[in-house]
Amino acid sequence: VQLVESGGGLAQAGASLELSCAASGFAIEPFDMYWYRQAPGTRRELVASISAGGKTNYGDSVKGRFTISRDNAKNTVPLQMNNLKPDDTATYYCNAKRTTFPKEYDYWGEGTQITVSS
């Protein structure tokens, strides 16, 4: 079971980047999928989520700029990030969660770094 984030790197403020989370060893279809981020010295915060049914939710700081989607056929979860700001600088993590009583599944990727310069 593995989640691998890709697409990170350096960007100028105002630019766009797309992250991708690729799952292997399991099918994402029944999972709720999340993107979190963590900057040095701060707590991990929710960036965006998409439920197994396709309902999306966004952190207040990224609403209107980031878009999460899912491709169950490709087993990936893209995160389109537009109008990047220096405050978006962080390590971004992909997370998959599913609860089928009594089991809980909670998988995390290693993260990908985004650095946005002003």
Image (tube, rainbow, N blue to C red):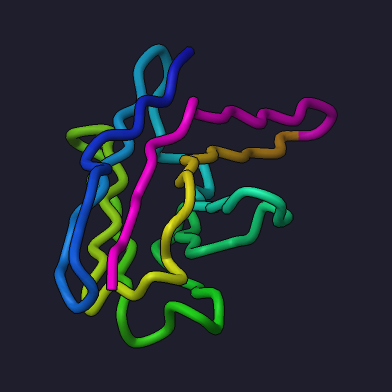
Q: Main secondary structure of the magenta part?
A: strand
The residue drawn where x is 19% and y is 36% is 73
Q: Is residue 33 magenta?
A: no
The stretch of residues the image draws in magenta is 101-118
The residue drawn where x is 26% and y is 34% is 6
Left or right of 12: which side holds 66?
right
The x, y position of residue 60, in whole percent, is 55, 83
- In the rendered image, the vertical position of residue 37 relative to residue 112, given as above or below: below
Q: Nearer the viewer, residue 79 or 32?
A: 79
- In the rendered image, the vertical position of residue 48 relative to residue 37, given as above or below: below
- In the rendered image, the vertical position of residue 96 relative to residue 110, given as above or below: below
The x, y position of residue 18, in whole percent, is 19, 54
Which corner quadrant of the image does residue 117 belong to?
bottom left
Which corner quadrant of the image does residue 67 belong to?
bottom left
Left or right of 6: which side holds 109?
right
Q: Nearer the viewer, residue 73 or 78?
A: 78
Left or right of 109: which side holds 13?
left
The x, y position of residue 21, in whole percent, is 33, 37
Quarter in which the C terminus is drawn: bottom left
Q: Nearer the viewer, residue 75 or 95?
A: 95
